[in-house]
Image (cartoon, rainbow, N blue to C red):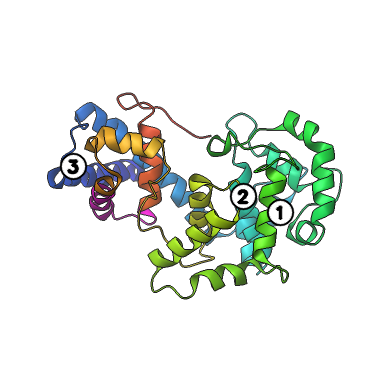
Amino acid sequence: MTKKYVEMYAEVDKAIQKCSSERQMPGLNDEVRKTLNLQFVDSIKRIKIIEVIDKKGVDDTCLKLNSDTFNPIKAIAWYKSIGNYNEAIWLIFLVTHFGKNINTNWNLLVDTYSGARVDSIWNWESTSTELGDFLDWLNLNEGNLKKVGKFGNHRKYQSISAVCKNGTGDAFTSYINWIGEDRDQLAKLLEVTNSAGNSFERFDMLYSAIKRNVNSFGRMATFDFCTMLGKFRLLDIEPGHTYLAGATGPVSGLKTLFGNKTLKELDEDVMVLYRNLNQFYGMQIIEDAICNWQKSTAKYRYFGG
């Protein structure tokens, strides 16, 4: 265990113990706390990876779709670094929509984005201006796409269909139509958020708009999309709570930890934990860690998919 990892673990343990001194945590014991700490450390590391990539910078090998070097997360940082915000945001949308599958990696995203590595790339420019052509292509290639990859864990019930309600075609169409005819994604996102007074309010305004207007983007996808925009510093937004309404795993975990309380009471408990954790994007860390921890509370398991 590296020194940095040990320090991170100690910081998390201190935050959880401090929270337990302020709020009742009947689900917490020494064995459970160790498992919970490890899940928090994993979640913090996942957040910090984005931060490191964004600040450190990347080279253009991450853009090569027909090679093992393609990485959509690094590609987001690349496009942002050269001022192509439309492509950076489009890739955030794709990363959110498809997710990374534990077995097939980014294959489904790559083969859709690259036109099955044969046709023209379905980047923001081509997809938003030739949406009908994209939907025809998607309908024609649906069977092949299903063979090469699967959706990530957060999107495991999502359909690749070009024509079904809440399928991939419906999600892309609703998002592109919501952005509008000028096709400037950043301008649209700023338009939605610029009347808010702080980063928490801006996040809430964007969350509400995305959830209302983008088909198939429920609570988790909307939360993931908005947090990615914030972590890449494309927008000055941060979640002020964990958006528990409609959640399953996080609510189950929080009730195991804090007791069988109402969502309002659980939100109050989470806020105490958030203040003690004192981490960049702390609410997403809590949401992710609790969701994974509740799957195995007394025995640590790594969740990467």
Amino acid type of the residue that numbered disc 3 sits on in the rendered structure? Gln
- Taking the spot 46% from the left edge, 67% from the top edge, the residue there is 236
Amino acid type of the residue that numbered disc 2 sits on in the rendered structure? Asn
Please determine whether, in this image, residue 178 is positioned above or below residue 289.
Answer: below
- How far, Cα to Cα, is label 2 from label 1? 9 Å
Amino acid type of the residue that numbered disc 1 sits on in the rendered structure? Thr
Callout 2 touching callout 1 (CB < 8 Å): yes
Magenta-colored stretch includes residue 141: no
- Pick whichever of labels 1 and 3 is earlier in the sequence: 3
Region rendered in magenta: 267-282
Q: Picture coordinates of residue 35 (x, y %)? A: 31, 31
Is 63 in front, or is 267?
Answer: 267
Magenta part, dominant SS: helix
Q: Which residue is mark 1?
A: 173
Question: In the image, is 246 to the left or to the right of 40?
Answer: right
Q: Could you say whether the residue bearing mark 1 is in a helix, strand or loop?
A: helix
Q: Could you say whether the residue bearing mark 2 is in a helix, strand or loop?
A: loop
The N terminus sits in image quarter: top left
Q: Picture coordinates of residue 229 (x, y %)? A: 53, 59
Q: Which residue is mark 3?
A: 17
Q: Which residue is mark 2?
A: 215
- How far, Cα to Cα, is label 3 from label 2? 41 Å
